[in-house]
Amino acid sequence: MLGQFRRECHRRRSLVQVFLEIQIATALADGQLHPAEKRILFSIGAELGFNHADIEHLFSLGGPQQAPRNRKQELAQAYEVLGVAQDAPDTEVKKAYRRMMSQHHPDKLIAKGLPEEMIRLATDKTQRIKAAYETIRDSRK
């Protein structure tokens, strides 16, 4: 069934990724992630063509964001959201930001005819991506 979904998406990885992100967000909605849920989500991700590190990154984006206790934690969380190392050059940070904004921008998903719930998730995600980029950019000034 997942293989058919992947084929129907015509290799649009961003669309498949949004589907996986929704599954992760749903599993995390009750504030707990049971080991069985995590195993199933990793199995789904693998069948959709994602490697372990990619799925872990989606988990970090999909869960409720804990309020950082200090500036250092806020900055570390920002780098995690963009999926770049803290010593990454500015060009790599900007490239990651633009790539993620392109993948998750609500207008792109509306054009693909995706449901309103997916659009809401994408809007929230783009706000977190933008905030993360601004945090990194401001720290480097």
Image: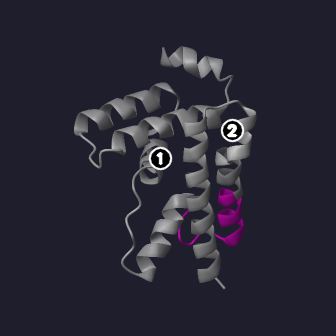
Q: Is residue 121 left or right of residue 110?
A: left
- In x, y percent, where is residue 85? 53, 65
Q: Quadrant of residue 110?
A: top right
Q: What kind of residue is marked 1?
A: Leu
Q: In the rendered structure, which disc, 1 or 2, sits on the residue that comes first in sequence?
A: 1
Q: Magenta residues?
A: 84-97
Nearer to the camera, 111 or 104: 111
Residue at 25% in and 33% down: 36
Q: Is residue 134 left or right of residue 70?
A: right
Which mark, residue 109? 2
- In x, y percent, where is residue 67? 39, 70
Which mark, residue 58? 1
Q: Is residue 41 left or right of residue 129?
A: left
Magenta span has 3?
Answer: no
Nearer to the camera, 67 or 46: 67
Q: How many residues crowd around disc 2 within 10 Å: few (fewer than 14), some, or many (20 or more)?
A: some
